[in-house]
Amino acid sequence: MIAYERTDIRQKLLTGGNCRLANVRSKFGIELFIPKFNYDNLEKFELIGLTKWLLIQRNERKPEDFRELGCAQCIHGESLGFDFSMAFQPIVDLRKGQIFAQEALARGLSGESAGTVFEQVDEHNLYRFDQTCRVKAIELASRFPSTSLISINFMPRAVYRPELCIRTTLAAAKEYSVDVSRIMFEVTEGEKVDDSSHLQSIINYYKSQGFKTAIDDFGAGFSGLNMLAEFLPDLVKLDMALIRNIHSSRSRKAIVKGVATMCHELDIGLIAEGIETVEEKETLLELGIYLQQGYLYSKPVFERFANEAEISEFKK
């Protein structure tokens, strides 16, 4: 946390809006939450006379279920009170004719849909669920001989402080002999992020530890370009709504071509997801997008990796 002078805080409120403040003079801290500053009453605004304040980010608060977790607690859902498993869907590299990454997707113990798992997740167990997903994905992936990336979706709201919340992931990678450079964390553009600086700190820290980062479902929300400009991930995954019938849509072609140009200029890899037809595949190739994912290549495979021999499109 950073201490600010009283005048600095006043200016931040005038120009920034949402803040959470704590009085550092108090042993326990007195929180003042200002959800929205009324710009029509600037003359009436005044901070109480304290010499210094601490600006506290909203996501700096621990999740209510936060605690240190070990691999053994996560691997069978012990920390959650319910268990689940994973399926993997490949992301293919059509230029090299090989699998680029395997995306881990939550499934029930008998392969039931992700919905049956997520209906058991709420704010009370979100952190433990996020941590358990990571351990399960890494443990399952370690069973198969592969050098492809392991793509894991993470939830920014479940990350209290990146340097603390990554410990279980690092322990799992070490225990199951998975190099951290093979692990890619995806955050969806549609994920509700109240504090962009918090998400920025997560992405920066993950990169510093050798992990890959990606924005998923790019184009599905309203903050995509802002996220791209602020976070500069290693990869971007185009939302399937932009891909569907792209071969017959002038507008989709133009948008995807523009995104491809931006990513090239920013040295960001681009993945198209949701490909279902050969026409979509060929159009994306014409636009220079070689990393692709979708049912055309493989549906998610329960508790194992699809391999190159199973993907018929590699043979065409």
Image (tube, rainbow, N blue to C red):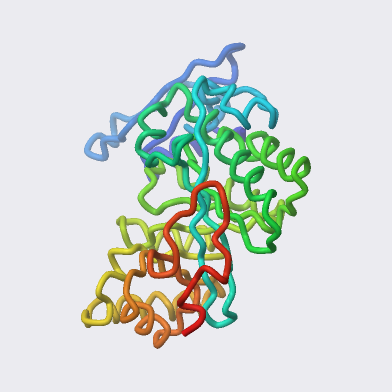
Q: Is residue 83 left or right of residue 296?
A: right
Using the rendered view, name the quadrant where residue 108 is placed. top left
Q: Measured along the vertical axis of the image, is residue 163 above or below residue 122?
A: below
Q: Residue 192's x, y, as percent?
A: 37, 43
294 or 65, which lies in front? 294
Q: Residue 46's x, y, as percent?
A: 38, 28
Residue at 46 percent across and 19 percent down: it is: 31
Q: Measured along the vertical axis of the image, is residue 229 above or below residue 315?
A: above
Q: Measured along the vertical axis of the image, is residue 120 above or below residue 26?
A: below
Q: Is residue 288 visible?
A: yes
Q: Is residue 270 left or right of residue 164?
A: left
190 or 53, which lies in front? 190
291 or 31, which lies in front? 291
Q: Measured along the vertical axis of the image, is residue 82 above or below residue 155?
A: above
Q: Is residue 22 left or right of residue 150?
A: left
Residue at 66 percent across and 39 percent down: it is: 166
Using the rendered view, name the quadrant where residue 287 is placed. bottom left
Residue farthest toward the top in the current orientation of the protein: 27
Q: Is residue 57 visible?
A: no
Residue at 69 percent across and 28 percent down: it is: 72
207 or 313, which lies in front? 313
Residue farthest toward the bottom in the current orientation of the protein: 286
Q: Residue 110's x, y, as percent?
A: 45, 37
Residue at 40 percent across and 88 percent down: it is: 286
Q: Residue 291's x, y, as percent?
A: 50, 73
For the N terminus, the quadrant is top right
